[in-house]
Image (spheres, rainbow, N blue to C red):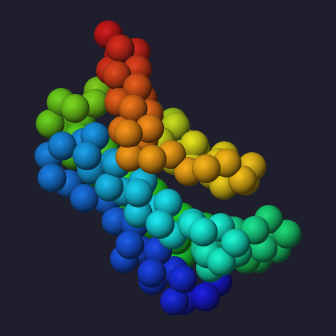
Amino acid sequence: MALAVSSEAADTAGHPDTGNLVEDVLAQLKAVIALLTPHQTSALTGIIAEALRDDDLAANLREQLIMPNIGLFDERMRSAQRHGEIPEGADLNLLNDLLHGTLYHRLVFHLDMPDDDELRERIQVVIVGLNARAH
């Protein structure tokens, strides 16, 4: 994987911790959308597409970009747990899949990416559902 793409993705799609989980996740997802669009010319989208055919590239993408970002996501979610925004026992892998999965679903099937309001609604639904599940 191109080091420049990995570096750009790491710099752009950070996980802010302002104390407002919904707005922080919104900012992070918007950054991911910026990296993936327009899909016809996005370097990251091209690498993802190629990684579907190339196991070595897929492993490299996971090691250099995906796993470090999952670690940052988990760190941000643990902060949210400490502040009572999500339950202590929340499944962070499930939460990551629910929050990021919509973007990749839309990317793969050439659907429009959600706008800010749609993203905010999805984030709120996931967080409310997560909190309801804990009670």
Q: Residue at x 57, y 67 (%)?
A: 37
- Residue at 29%, 27% (x, y): give it: 87
On screen, residue 97 above or below 113: above
The quarter of the rendered structure image containing the N terminus is: bottom right
> Residue at 35% of width from left, 14% of height from top?
132
Residue 39 sits in which quadrant? Answer: bottom right
* Visible residue check, residue 103: yes
Quadrant into which the C terminus falls: top left
Measured from the top left, where is residue 44 in percent x and y? 61, 74
Seen in the picture, residue 5 relative to 121 is either above or below; the reply is below
Q: Is residue 85 left or right of residue 119?
A: left
Total number of numbered discs in the rendering: 0
The spot of residue 77 in percent (x, y) is 31, 44
Quarter assignment of residue 40: bottom right
Left or right? Give the position of 74 relative to 112. Answer: left
In the image, residue 69 sits, relative to residue 10, either above or below, namely above
Q: Is residue 49 left or right of residue 35?
A: right
Q: Residue furthest top?
A: 135
Tell me where residue 79 appears, x and y as whole percent: 21, 46
Q: Is residue 92 visible?
A: no
Residue 95 spot, x, y in % from top left: 45, 37
Query: Height in image: 42 above or below 98?
Result: below
In the rendered image, which quarter is residue 38 located in? bottom right
Tell me what residue is drawn at x 58 percent, y 44 percent: 101
Query: Closer to the camera, 58 or 105?
Result: 105
